[in-house]
Image: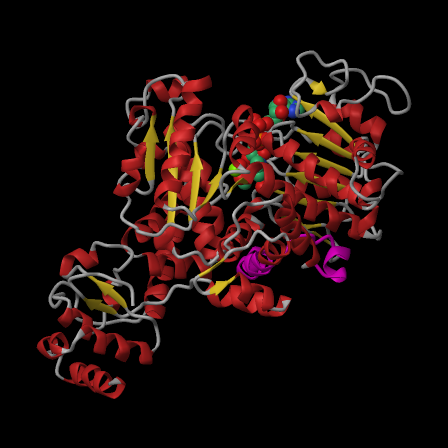
Amino acid sequence: MASRLGSLVRESAKNGGRIGSWARSLASADLSRAYSSLGNRPILVDKRGADILHDPWLNKGTAHPQVERDSLGMRGLLPPNVISLDQQVARFGLSFRSLERKTKDGESDVRALAQWRLLNRLHDRNETLYYRVLIDNIKEFAPIVYTPTVGLVCQNYSGLFRRTRGMYFSAKDKGLMASMVYNWPSERVDVIVVTDGSRILGLGDLGVQGIGIPIGKLDLYVAAGGINPARVLPVCLDVGTNNTALLENPLYLGLRQPRLEGEEYLAVLDEFMEAVYLRWPKVIVQHEDFQNKWAFSMLKRYRNKYRMFNDDVQGTAGVALAGILGSVRAMGRPMSDISKMRVVVVGAGSAGLGVVNMVRESMAMAEGVSAETLKKAAENFWILDKEGLVTEERKDMDPDVKDYARSVNGSLALPEGAALLDVVKKVKPDVLLGLSGVGGIFNKQILEAMKHERNHRPAVFAMSNPTSNAECSSTDCFKILGGNCVFASGSPFPDVDLGSGAVGKANQGNNMYLFPGIGLGTYLAGARLVTDGMLHAAAERLASMMSAEDVAKGVIFPPVTDIRAVAKEVGAAVVKAAVDEDLAEGTWSADVRDLRAMSQDEIVEYVERMMWSPAYSPLIYSKSKESI
Ligand SMILES: NC(=O)C1=CN([C@@H]2O[C@H](COP(=O)(O)OP(=O)(O)OC[C@H]3O[C@@H](n4cnc5c(N)ncnc54)[C@H](O)[C@@H]3O)[C@@H](O)[C@H]2O)C=CC1
Ligand SMILES: CC(=O)C(=O)O
Ligand SMILES: [Mg+2]
């Protein structure tokens, strides 16, 4: 059969593709077997012609081979020259470079949006080519589809909106969500990223325009985590906005009403969660960029019921933990010395508190986690919010921060609400960690104060996004602290030339290093829940990927170009943890017994094998579409 199809294809090439009737006369099962033996798994489609060209999951554009053009009624709908996926990638590169040349002297925001538009249009047309381009150029394109440009895109989303992507559930859909989920065209969804748009990066409440974040996160799920793009769903819950500029903007596409509060808000969230699990019982739901007042409570409400996690609270925590472990090693100390670190955290929101909770647990682990060791570990943190240092004298204390409130007496005592500079001068921290959303708050004086005798290799993490909200830049940090400090930021910053061959290494400390692997591992494990054990395993695997030579140079995270390998390793660690915790049910391709029988290396191989990668599959017409 393979040779019959091969000869058909060769024949077609010779005679200009006049084999439509032959190809159609072959039973689709024969064709599918034939295609299988040629390589990619074929896809049965119940569409033809222009409908395929307008379906980004199926469209190959100029790469549709002649046999498909004939069998699927596309002859004449495309220019006659058939080109390959590689050639299409190269053509996209040429057109992207030409845009770069044309916009190089223009305003940087205009240029960034033009670059995003070019990628977005490709995403809308042809998902296979889009992800191939993204994977092949991840270092260059992640900052466009993800932070920082995605922030700018969200700020302008209503004006940029052309073709819809994802789903919107609003307060107006009450009682209808269980039927609405069936409007989504894909029968299978593995990962949903959902936001309510209330705290988009460090840019505040962007209402329905926050949809750009789930889209960008899911781009990384596909490109890094190898999740099939036909099985991801970005969602925005439109519960109103308190952003008056948006409410007054005639272009704004969301509901023009203040945000729902209390029971009304909860009713939307509950109905949404129930609806998606009704249609897709095994889906993983990632909560993203919910304002602090809801992030923790939603996590507590759902994490023991559904297969879900909050990326800002839990993904960020794992990345910061891995970064701090790397910094401890960079100081020339064993990882167990994490329990001796003094950490000043600026920002007591969902991200900041998520980080301190996880790092504290890791500190306590050295001596065995107990109420006593956790209490002792909490003393390693000084937490500031917009009112300054949180002490036991704080009025209306957030219960989530209470454990970390500092005493106003004794050694290292500081007054309630003490300013950051005073805290840094007195505490002389090993790690200064920013998750405040306040751009430039680590100013010259603060960074000068980080030069102290307690630690000649301190770590500065300016983790807020996007770039303009980073607490300091790599240049500020290295120019003041010298090449010895360890620097990480949420959005990418360049390495810094310190003269005489010395280079300050700018690490990107972003939850993008963990969430794709957490989702991938949870999915392949078929884990019922996402547990702390799985999250610790993910963070520890990320930390362990850095070699002694890397950390000695101040490199504490892998390069973005390795993000697919990171997701694979993290995913495998999550699978293993889920199996060890007896939470794994496996999937159709490996059930729990298969997973249990695998060695660690075999799990890594299995995860890699299961990762989707972009390649064109042969398309075969069938009236009743079923997977083969
Ligand atoms: N690098 C990464 O992977 C991640 C970065 N982030 C970034 O972290 C930032 C904060 O996110 P969330 O915690 O979710 O926000 P949030 O709104 O929950 O918390 C912000 C916190 O910063 C505090 N704050 C505001 N102004 C301050 C000031 N002048 N001094 C000290 N503290 C101040 C607030 O009181 C609040 O405690 C955002 O910019 C976000 O982009 C969040 C998640 C992951
Ligand atoms: C990276 C991320 O999740 C944030 O800035 O919110
Ligand atoms: Mg986020």
Residue 98 spot, x, y in % from top left: 36, 56
- Total labels drawn: 0
Residue 354 is inside the magenta segment: no
Q: Is residue 245 above or below residue 139?
A: above
The residue nearer to you, when weighing 92 against 244, is: 244
- Viewer-closest of 184 and 542: 184
Please name the residue shown 91% across and 24% down the image: 411
Q: Is residue 40 visible?
A: yes
Residue 107 in sight in this render:
no
Q: Residue at x 77, y 56 (%)?
A: 552
Quadrant for the N terminus in the image: bottom left
Q: Position of residue 256 (x, y in %)?
A: 32, 19
The colour scheme of the drawn protein is: secondary structure
Which secondary structure type mostly characterizes the magenta part of the structure? helix
Q: What quarter of the picture does the C terminus occupy?
A: bottom left
Residue in front for this viewpoint, 21 or 627: 627
Q: Ligand 1 falls in which quarter?
A: top right
Q: Which quarter of the figure has residue 235?
A: top left
530 or 144, which is in the foreground? 530
Above or below, comparing residue 311 to residue 227 in the picture = above
Q: In this image, 79 relative to 183: left or right? A: left
Residue 119 drawn at (x, y percent): 36, 51
Q: Is residue 410 left or right of residue 358?
A: right
Q: State which quadrant residue 421 falls in.
A: top right
Find out whether residue 567 is within the magenta segment.
Answer: yes
Residue 611's spot in the image, x, y percent?
46, 62
Boundaries of the magenta span: 546-572
Q: Is residue 455 above or below residue 292?
A: below
Left or right, 24 with reference to 206: left
